[in-house]
Amino acid sequence: MKIVTGVDWSDEAFAAVKQIGLFYRPDEVVLVHGVDLGMFHYPIVAEAANIQGYDEFRHALLEAGRQAVEHCCTLLSTDIPSVKTRVDVQPPASFILDTAASAKADLVAVGTHDHNRITEVFAGSISHHVLLHATLPTVIVKGSARPISRILMAVEGREDAIRLQQWLTAHPFKNPVAVTVFSVVPSLHVVEPHMLIGLAGWSEQQKQQAEQVVKDTALALTSVHFIVTSEVRLGDPVTTVCEAGVAYDLIVIGSHGRKGFNRFLMGSVSHGIVHRASCSVLVVR
């Protein structure tokens, strides 16, 4: 398994590096640090702004990045066969994603400062941009690194469940874990009673279908790596998953691929869960 991890001097980045070693036994880890000079990325702009010592300033930031990466190397398990590093003057989020693509990584890992959603969108957040634009599985690490023993696998329909089950089976965790295959059937929120005509049995029918999906998925996932149970609840998907997730070490969810500002305007269950969950979240694409 090959993992690309974005790092800096923050405690959140250090936690992400430690956490991947508690999640998996990777064959290779690539630690990436991008130095974002903003508008001063180009020397000609710095010259126009009459900035003194531009070369020294750029070199100092690169050196600080190299030191951060070197420190993160010491946080990794010594039994990882290959550890590579990349430091360059690049926007951090795009540098992480470009590195993951070129390295053919299986997973991207980033820590989060846990900004509120408005701050993420308008002030910017590396983890937010990575989550928004990643095309491969991404784990957003929250809080301090910790061993994992309980996982909440939230599925939406059979296709989503099969995709998550296949990914987890192909990438087993470092140690056996207990997995709850979890599905939420949205409640019907209506004001006028007459609108319920023809929909009275909808929730019960959907609940029965969801129960069959989670039971089939639990059966398919059960192995020496996973001790599996299943559960279905009624409610708002984001709220219900996050409330249930309080008792778990990791939430695993799928992403349906909505991109860019369209995702922000229309909403995204996966993004909402990542934002509101109290534990780390693995988004499988």
Image: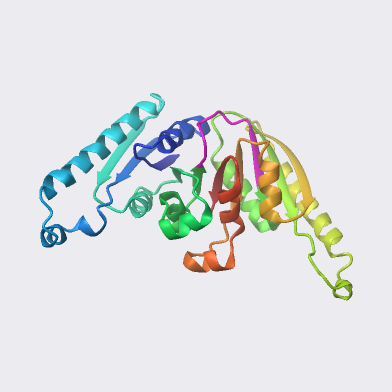
| Above/below status of 70 relative to 242 | above
Q: How many marks?
A: 0
State the colouring used for the structure image: rainbow
Q: Main SS type for the magenta part?
A: loop
Q: Is residue 72 left or right of residue 22?
A: left
Q: Residue at x 86, y 59 (%)?
A: 204
Q: Position of residue 242 (x, y in %)?
A: 66, 46
Q: Position of residue 182 (x, y in %)?
A: 72, 46
Could you tell me if residue 220 is visible in this image?
no
Q: Give the residues drawn in magenta, as a range.
A: 141-153
Q: Which residue is drawn at 20% across and 57% down?
A: 40
User: Relative to the observer, which residue lies in front, 263 or 225?
Assistant: 263
Q: Which residue is drawn at 70% across and 43% down?
A: 244
| Above/below status of 38 relative to 151 | below
Q: Position of residue 152 (x, y in %)?
A: 66, 41
* Magenta-span inclusion, residue 41: no
Q: Residue furthest top?
A: 78
Q: Is residue 3 left or right of residue 83?
A: right
Q: Where is residue 60 in the image (x, y as percent from the top left)?
A: 18, 40
User: Relative to the observer, which residue lies in front, 163 or 15?
Assistant: 15
| Above/below status of 170 relative to 256 | above
| Above/below status of 19 relative to 130 | above
Q: In which quarter of the image is the N terminus?
A: top left
Could you tell me if residue 272 is visible in this image?
yes
